Image (cartoon, rainbow, N blue to C red):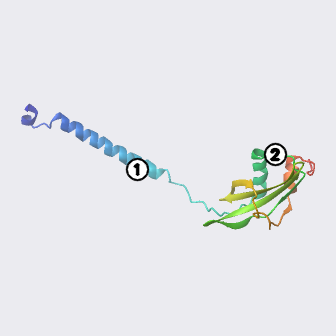
Amino acid sequence: MAELLAGAPPSGFLRGVVIRTAGALSAALVAALAGCSQFGKTEQDPNLYPANYKADLVAYIRTHQPEMLRARESYVSAPTLKQFDLQSRYFVCLRIDGPDGRKEKFAVFFAGAINQFVDAAGEQCGAAAYQPFPELLAVLGTPGGKK
């Protein structure tokens, strides 16, 4: 009661003000940092043409597909834009002939980089216009290559 008579606010009142102020400042800081996380980022074109698709395929196979390293012959199609559900993406078909038979792979690109690399299913690569892909054999040092 003496606090009220002296004109000072009650101690519980001050504690509430401090807590509310700290909470508001914290929320403002979080909002500011969230806004800055997008600063300087540019939107990527999901359908950017994969200009280095052959080099990207070689690097991907060396890293992720060891069973394909024994290829005797290799063929690749040129990047083609294809509709997938509601979106279009560039893709290539890759065919490898090796000691374990023939394998066909389907590589989908997003923003010019490999996004998916899966076994070709059904007719995904049935109409692909394959071209020899000696760059793969040369880098891998397989019998069909130059190394």
* Distance from Cα at disc 2 to Cα at disc 1: 48 Å
Residue shown at 19% from the left, 38% from the top: 13
Q: Is residue 112 visible?
A: no
- The residue carrying mark 1 is 31
At label 1, which amino acid type do we have? Ala
Q: Position of residue 12 (x, y in %)?
A: 19, 35
- Mark positioned earlier in the residue sequence (2 or 1): 1
Residue shown at 82% from the left, 67% from the top: 129
**Residue 97 or residue 58, whichever sits in front:** 97
- The answer to whether 93 is drawn above or below residue 12 in the figure is below
Q: Position of residue 87 (x, y in %)?
A: 62, 65
* Quadrant of the image containing the N terminus: top left
Asked which secondary structure carries label 1, the reply is helix
Circle 1 packing at 10 Å, graded few (<14), some (14-19), many (20+), is few
Q: Is residue 24 visible?
A: yes
Circle 2 packing at 10 Å, graded few (<14), some (14-19), many (20+), is few
- The residue carrying mark 2 is 67
- The answer to whether 31 appears left or right of 102 in the picture is left
**Residue 98 or residue 131, whichever sits in front:** 98
Q: Position of residue 107 (x, y in %)?
A: 73, 57
